Amino acid sequence: MTVQLALRVVSLESRRSDDMARLLVRHGLVPIHAPSLREVPLEDQTEAFAFGDALAAGKCDVLVLLTGVGAGALVDAIATRRPRDQVLAALAGIVLVCRGPKPVAMLKALGLKASVVAPEPNTSHELLAALAGLDLRGKHVWVQEYGRTNPELLGELSAQGAQVHRAAVYAWRLPEDIQPLEQAIVALCEAEAEAVLFTSARQIDHLLQVAERMQRQAALINALRTSVLVVSIGPVTSEALREHGLHADLEPEHSKMGHMAKLLAAEGLRALEHKRDPARK
């Protein structure tokens, strides 16, 4: 009788770590908790306040919203200095561009509606394509960032003649307790885990940052390239993996945790065997 391996999976999820763990267990997988992010407001809200000033002065033509959380945080930050109803009224008068469904949902909750929405898979490529119908020459375009700047997006908007400004309202930092993350790195390097899940680009940065502190970055990268299954929630995260010379072995059709867990349970063992022995069919 053959006993199928229950894949041990490192989850780097922070805000929804319990939800991810339940999904993994439900699909017969063994979660290893390793929160990698701590979302905090920027101590210096200079960019958010500058955007609020520009919005009130009519010097914002287009606002590009990259995340739902960031969209809400931007409004909250401005509303500490200006009446909230005036902020919302001003936003209703400009072009609101959303990279995906989460900022669309946040705008709806605020009583606002997106002017342009990028289609799936919601990467910078789709976002720029969705903006192709707009004449951005000379327009003030503000980009709400999400803890990780996107030079390609900013550069392309500038190339189209836009006056581009950044509006970052929160940042990602390492958790106060990084021991679980350190233990997960050891598990990945020592073959005590078979897979790792990435649900955001910043998780990759932090995992490698902590591994470097531990003098294990080279070993970790080697494991991710040769013996550990790398699962990415979608094209945006997969693109960030490639920036570090890594690639996703599995990527769900839809960028949702449930689809991610289901795909890993269905295809993970076969994909892992192939990664470790490419000649194996």
Image: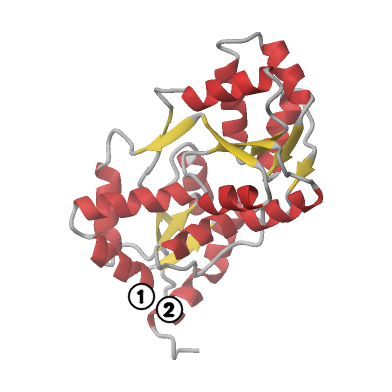
Above-or-below relation of 141 to 209: above
Residue 251 screen position, x and y as percent: 57, 64
Left or right: 137 as drawn, with respect to 144 = right
Left or right: 138 as drawn, with respect to 240 = right
Using the rendered view, name the quadrant where residue 223 is placed. bottom left
Name the secondary structure under disc 2.
helix
Seen at 58% across and 18% down, the residue is 78
Above-or-below relation of 38 to 134: above
Q: Are marks 2 and 1 in contact (CB under 8 Å)?
A: yes
Q: Amino acid at mark 1?
A: Thr
Residue 24 screen position, x and y as percent: 49, 53
Marks counted in the figure total 2
Seen at 35% across and 75% down, the residue is 226
Using the rendered view, name the quadrant where residue 58 is placed. top right
Residue 272 screen position, x and y as percent: 44, 74
Q: Which residue position is annotated with label 1?
A: 226
Q: Residues within 10 Å of mark 1 (few under 14, many from 20)?
A: some
How far separated are the C-alphas under marks 2 and 1? Answer: 7 Å
Using the rendered view, name the quadrant where residue 262 is placed. bottom right
Q: Which residue position is annotated with label 2?
A: 275
Seen at 38% across and 80% down, the residue is 276
* Residue 71 visible in image: yes
Name the secondary structure under disc 1.
helix
- Quadrant placement of the N terminus: bottom left
Looking at the image, is mark 2 or mark 1 earlier in the sequence? 1
Q: Amino acid at mark 2?
A: Lys
Above-or-below relation of 106 to 119: above
